[in-house]
Amino acid sequence: MNDQWKYDLRDSLEAVEDLVRRVGLSPDEAERVRDVIARYPMRITPHVLKTIRYKDDPIWLQVVPTTEEMDISDDMQDDPLNEEGDMVVPHLVHRYPDRVLLFVTNQCPIYCRFCTRKRFVGSPGGTITPEAIDAVAEYIRSHAEIRDIIFSGGDPLLLVDPLLERILSTLRSIPHLEIIRIGSRVPGTLPSRITPELCAMLKKYHPLYMNLHFNHPNEITVEVAEACGRLADVGIPLGSQTVLLKGVNDDPDTMKQLMQKLLRIRVKPYYLYQADLVTGTQQFRTPVETGLNILRALHGHTSGMAIPRYVIDAPGGGGKITVVPPEFVLEMNSREVILKNYEDQVYRYPQVQQAPSGQGSYAPCGGAAPTEDSGRPIPVQRLPR
Ligand SMILES: *Cc1c(COP(=O)(O)O)cnc(C)c1O
Ligand code: SF4
């Protein structure tokens, strides 16, 4: 039954009529999103459908289209991260010094209504061709500084095993490419895809990492836990990526539950993303303060293992920038650092005495290097609470 995932995919909801027959929308409600689906495809796997508990619940909101997706706003763009601008050969984005992002397909198990790549997911003909794979490999071969590649899309695990293996083996033949990563929402939405055959194939290409997309604790079902277990059992380190979404996970309790549940299925929280400024996703936006409050509720109150890095992917292609509550570091100068802990108590950490010659002087992370004028405070940005 290892082709079960193909039947599950075929059995997914994609049409307006499916919303009436299987989700329970009235014909009028369903008719209103006909244009939305024509522009931004819908897909809901049988597994995800099963996890919807009521109308507008945190799973429903992620997958059922709304007319708000047609709203336009000056702040929002089709490609806010300027990925097309950093595309060096078709399918390959090279933005950071030592790693690249590869769009292997534009097909996904579900089409998340808030997707950053709404501009291209779900349309026909978006899967990488053998010729394009060769062009990508050629580019990487001639750039020795690239030591890390992330397969993304779309969802790489929707490729059939032979095509996925073809890409993996082609790239594995490049000696300086140290690690391969796969970003996927498949284990959490189409767990039947994680077959023993797929796992046995993947394990030949280590070091291989996976970052899985999860946004709500209800996504972690028994089937999903088992699928993640199969991946972890073949030695693939699993991380998670979560998008902060209004109405889905924008409160500390939900987020804490999600992160702790992920650790129980051997998925280590990696990134929490502030929502990108993507046309048609305005309704999911939260203030940055919401994310900071979630971090305040996690830090110290639960294990550091359960805390993802909260990042804003800078509009225009500036890349991911980590954001932390500013009051964690109240002040920093060459004599001391003033810190606040999770119980709001303030602590002083004395700096190491600087050697006069600059020998042994060391810039701490964040670039806030000790200055010559010893004792002068280095300004720390504050936000009103
Ligand atoms: C997120 C991203 C990466 C990977 O970033 P890491 O911080 O290494 O996970 C690489 N390239 C692009 C274009 C990205 O958006
Ligand atoms: S699975 Fe990922 S790429 Fe696909 S629609 Fe969802 S967020 Fe976008």
Image (spheres, rainbow, N blue to C red):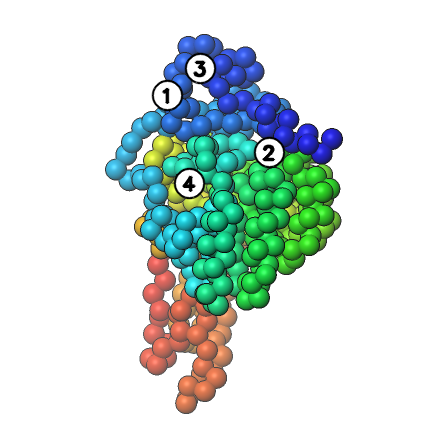
Disc 3 under 8 Å from ligand 2? The reply is no
- Is there any visible trace of residue 269 in the rendered image? no
Q: Say which residue label 2 marks.
A: 189
Distance in Å between CA atoms under marks 3 and 2 = 23 Å
The residue drawn where x is 54% and y is 22% is: 13
Mark nearer the N terminus (4 vs 1) = 1
Check contact, mark 4 vs mark 3: CB within 8 A: no
Mark nearer the N terminus (2 vs 1) = 1
Q: Sort mark 3 into few (<14), some (14-19) or many (20+) by Cα contacts within 10 Å.
A: many
Q: Say which residue label 4 marks.
A: 116
Q: Nearer the viewer, mark 4 or mark 1?
A: 1
Q: Residue most toward the front?
A: 131
For numbered disc 1, what is the local secondary structure?
A: helix
Q: What amino acid is labelled 3 in the image?
A: Ala
Q: What amino acid is labelled 2 in the image?
A: Thr
Relative to 96, residue 128 above or below? above
| x and y, in percent, of residue 307 in the image | 56, 51
The disc label shown at residue 35, or none: 1
Disc 2 under 8 Å from ligand 2? The reply is yes
| x and y, in percent, of residue 302 in the image | 61, 49
Disc 4 under 8 Å from ligand 2? The reply is yes
Q: Sort mark 2 into few (<14), some (14-19) or many (20+) by Cα contacts within 10 Å.
A: many
The residue drawn where x is 36% and y is 62% is: 380
Of residues 225 and 185, the one drawn nearer to the viewer in this rendering: 185
For numbered disc 2, what is the local secondary structure?
A: helix
Question: Where is residue 21, by image quadrant?
Answer: top right
- Is there any visible trace of residue 158 in the rendered image? yes
For numbered disc 3, what is the local secondary structure?
A: helix
The residue drawn where x is 52% and y is 63% is: 147
